[in-house]
Image (cartoon, rainbow, N blue to C red):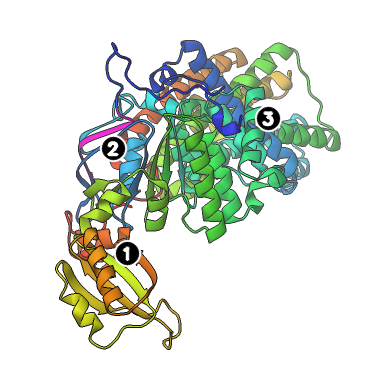
Amino acid sequence: MSVYEFRRTVSPQAAAAWTPRQVLLTNLRAVGGRAYPRVHGLFREKSWVFFEVLLPFLSTSTFVFVYRALRAPPEYIGFVVLGGAMTAFWLNVIWMMASQLWWEKSQGNLELYFAAPMSIMSVLFGMALGGMVMSSTRAVIVLAVASLLYEVRFAIDQWLLLLAVFFLTLAALYGLGMMLASLFLVWGREAFQMSQLFTEPVYFVSGLNFPVARLGLLGALALATIPLAVGLDAMRQLAFIGANFPIGTPPPEVEALILVVMTVVFLVAARWMLRTLERRARREGRLSVRWQ
Amino acid sequence: MAIPATPTPSPTGPPAPPAIEARGLRRIYKVKPTPVVALEHVDLEVAPGEFFGLLGPNDAGKTTLIKILTTLLLPSEGTARIFGFDVSREETQIRRIMNMVAGGEQSGYGILTVREQLWMFSQFYGLSRSDGWRRVDELVDAVGMGAEREQRVSTLSTGQRQKMNIARGLLNDPWILFLDEPTLGLDVAAARQVRELVSAWKAAVLGRTVLLTTHYMAEADELCDRIAIVDHGRILAIGTPEELKRRVQRESIFRVELDHLDAGGAAALALLPGVLSVAPAAADGGPVDRQTVGLNLALAQDGILASVVGALGDLGSHIVALRKSEPSLEDVFVELVGRGFDDPDAAEASGPGGTAGAA
């Protein structure tokens, strides 16, 4: 029997009638399938180490030397190192999540995704999962090397809460990325410019290189809207207990709750936007490259 | 496991729905400065198990139709169903039983190997991890890419890439496979391999349906059970290749090669009842100083040939070769449209919408 004689179902109607278990399994497998290129690509494309580990590390080092020259409190070095590590996630979210559906469309993948029987949310979850693994590796390298090199002293009292805040930050960040992916696709050709537009301002208002409380009202606004800002502030509070921390931001427990709310809101919004996008794209013929 | 599963109606059950059923399908693209009518009231029915072709030039509306049938595009008007499932409302069910491959497709990720890329797509169709790898390995061998299985996708040639795409299209064992210009840009050998792959897959299990769009007439002629000729968003004719050719063949054309023919012989043949015309035939690309005499005979019907053969014997001529000339699908297209496939000026000139639509 040849491979072409493989047949799993007896009729098209039987083949189309999936059980809830089949639906769930297919979506879970789709998550794993889409995460695969990112996880394995990490070990295959060595140049990324240079661009996404060494360059952010240099940027972090710049601020370390500035703080040292200004004789800032030593915990500020830690703040910068932590911010530098989290840079990897924001870069990943903005360039490889938010812009990704637009790139997928350009490559011709998007219509294959829509034509497959899984939810596009699974593809986005897969991208997010792969992105988290990819960026975590880089973040750990930056954190470890910079901490050793610049003698960062962490003072952690609530390990569990710190870990929870870290994972909630990732969940909210990638939820935001999933939402932005639909938005960028609707904006079409401007995705590249939109990514650039979002990169630096978010660095600034998130307080990647300084405590966000220093920004006053702008910082408060960032805490309410940008997961990176609130997550980073909470992690700094938890990783540097007793530090000379500027007042004005909520305690980490409250910030953890803010992250939970953000995660839910972003994921629900992403799902709604994807559905709206698909309806609109099918109506207007925007799933393929032509007629966009 | 092979289960002969053509969805034929049971004696007591309801009749099986067509593989494709389109009624009054219309699609308008709202582009500036003027909307483009890509499909204009298309009616189409394809039976389960058919290899059906959409033949037409670029911008005929073939790709628009395939995008509607694959649930990627909504019709502006009309309805379409795949095995009874509505493309507008039951896209989830359709996506579980179909797959699609387009010519020149650059899908996937160059950083992956052929095997990994196909496995990734297998996961989108719900195959388990191990089943996915097994199915991928089988298909990679079946499409003759065993040597390239660990090669990165970014390094594949166009032909290799298209064979990989065909393997991707077969991963979920679709009940209906949509092929949009699958041999576009391939060299002769690679195109033949792709056609053979699809034919072998289609023939292996009863009930598999293929919709092929192409603007290669020979490809449609070779592969398809039935063909719809499409131009400017309209279906101009549907039938088997033979039926379509018969539409333009109102007379029997024979090409006869004789060892010699005396002067006046052709005129004598032309006077026979039922002989419509006798014309000297050009050499088939051979030298002009050939040793035989070629004639093109137009007869009212095939049966007249007997009297022509008898008359040639009376004239002392011996037949060296005789063959019947068949019209090509291109002849059919020219007859229906009034221009050839490669006539861009004419393509702009007529048809609903007046402008070239999405291919």
Task: Please give the range of residues in magenta.
Answer: B18-27
**Which residue corresponds to the image point at 73% horizontal and 33% vertical from the top-left?**
A137
Task: Please tell me whether mark 3 or mark 2 is closer to you in this view.
Answer: 2
Query: Label 1 marks which chain's residue?
Result: B
Asked if A77 appears above or below B10 in the picture, the reply is below
**Secondary-structure class at tag 3:** helix
Secondary structure under tag 2 reads: helix
Residue at the spot 19% in from the left edge and 79% down from the top edge: B268
**Which sits in the foreground, B336 or B273?**
B273
Q: On the image, numbered disc 2 is attached to which residue? A: A283
- Up the image or down, A203 lies above or below B132; here it is below
Q: Which residue is mark 1?
A: B325
Assess whether residue B23 is covered by the magenta stretch: yes
Q: Residue at x 40, y 25 (%)?
A: B6
The percent coordinates of residue B3 (x first, y second) are 50, 21
- Rendered position, B86 above or below B311: above
Residue A133 disc label: 3
